[in-house]
Image: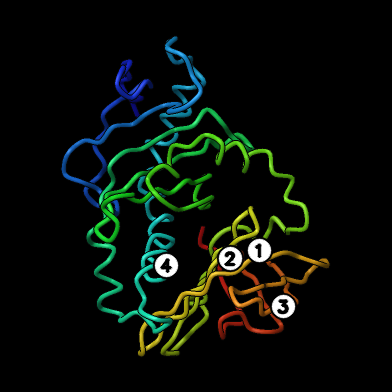
């Protein structure tokens, strides 16, 4: 694949290309969107081969990155909009995804394990003032918030240098119970981030409910969750990698004992 054609954008003060997303990619607009390399902390000299390779890597994987971001965007929207701790109606929650579109993509000059950090800014129908931004490291969501979350360099740098103290890196990312919920009318998912924050989502016939929490591993093989009310629960677990990467809990997380890794 030919790499993006960059030129210096004085307004954005960044090297910028215009890219067209595949129509099957989630949140893909019909028009090209700007791809900015190093939106913060870089001078005007042309991109070198390594920087161009990083940008090309991001463009080639954008459909997968957007697919990973979709789950977090959905949970973020449900949690933001749900009225007074009531489950979000399934139809209304599903419709939230349809109104989101990519506005811009940012590739940061920061990497961890040779994988660059990529930010995506979206139009946001439920918060037009602040927009929506997601920062990813591969298919792992690093953070979500206003549109500036996608381009703030310090968020990527913090994650890239984080020693992960007190956390099990094998648990980082998104986990989904649906591959193991045969014939069950509900499913759960959760996401554990490297900054010690996370969320879980329970979906059943009544609707969808999202819980935010902090997490750590006080002992090997033990996941500790602390919800927004300060309630602490501990869940002994085992991670296996065959036939798929999965985690099994002795005590359920959101009513699920077994989850497959999906991001």
Residue 87: percent from left, percent from top: 39, 83
Q: Is residue 36 left or right of residue 221?
A: left
- How far separated are the C-alphas under marks 3 and 2? 21 Å
Disc 4: which residue: 75
Q: Is residue 171 above or below residue 40?
A: below
Mark 3 touches mark 2? (CB < 8 Å): no
Disc 3: which residue: 235
Looking at the rendered image, the disc whose residue lies closer to the viewer, 3 or 1, is 3
Q: Is residue 154 above or below residue 241?
A: above
Disc 1: which residue: 241
In-front residue for pair 25/222: 222
Q: Residue shown at 16%/44% (left/top)?
A: 30
Looking at the rendered image, the disc whose residue lies closer to the viewer, 4 or 2, is 4
Q: Residue shown at 51%/23% (left/top)?
A: 41
Disc 2: which residue: 244
Mark 3 touches mark 1? (CB < 8 Å): no
In-front residue for pair 109/145: 145
Which numbered disc, 1 or 4, marks the residue that appears first in the sequence?
Answer: 4
Which numbered disc, 4 or 2, marks the residue that appears first in the sequence?
Answer: 4
- How far separated are the C-alphas under marks 3 and 1? 19 Å
Residue 232: percent from left, percent from top: 70, 78
Mark 1 touches mark 2? (CB < 8 Å): yes
- Secondary structure category for the residue under label 4: helix
Identify the image quadrant of the N terminus: top left
């Amino acid at each position: 694949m030919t790499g993006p054609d960059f030129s210096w954008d004085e307004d954005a003060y960044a090297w910028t290309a215009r890219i067209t997303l595949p129509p099957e990619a989630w949140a893909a607009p019909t028009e090209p969107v700007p791809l900015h390399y190093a939106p913060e902390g870089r001078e005007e000299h042309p991109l070198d081969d390594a920087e161009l390779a990083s940008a090309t890597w991001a463009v080639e994987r954008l459909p997968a990155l957007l697919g990973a971001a979709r789950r977090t965007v959905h949970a973020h929207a449900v949690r933001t909009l749900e009225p007074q701790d009531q489950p979000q109606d399934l139809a209304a929650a599903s419709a939230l995804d349809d109104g989101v579109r990519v506005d811009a993509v940012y590739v940061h000059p920061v990497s961890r394990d040779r994988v660059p950090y990529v930010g995506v800014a979206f139009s946001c129908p439920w918060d037009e003032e602040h927009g929506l931004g997601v920062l990813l490291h591969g298919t792992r969501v690093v953070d979500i918030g206003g549109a500036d979350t996608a381009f703030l360099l310090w968020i990527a740098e913090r994650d890239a240098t984080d020693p992960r103290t007190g956390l099990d890196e094998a648990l980082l990312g998104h986990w989904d119970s649906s591959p193991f919920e045969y014939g069950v009318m509900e499913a759960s998912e959760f996401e554990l981030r490297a900054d010690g924050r996370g969320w879980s989502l329970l979906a059943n016939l009544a609707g969808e409910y999202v819980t935010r929490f902090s997490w750590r591993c006080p002992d090997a093989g033990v996941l500790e969750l602390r919800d927004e009310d300060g309630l602490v629960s501990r869940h002994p677990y085992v991670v296996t990698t065959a036939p798929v990467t999965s985690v099994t809990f002795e005590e359920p997380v959101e009513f699920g004992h077994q989850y497959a890794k999906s991001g």
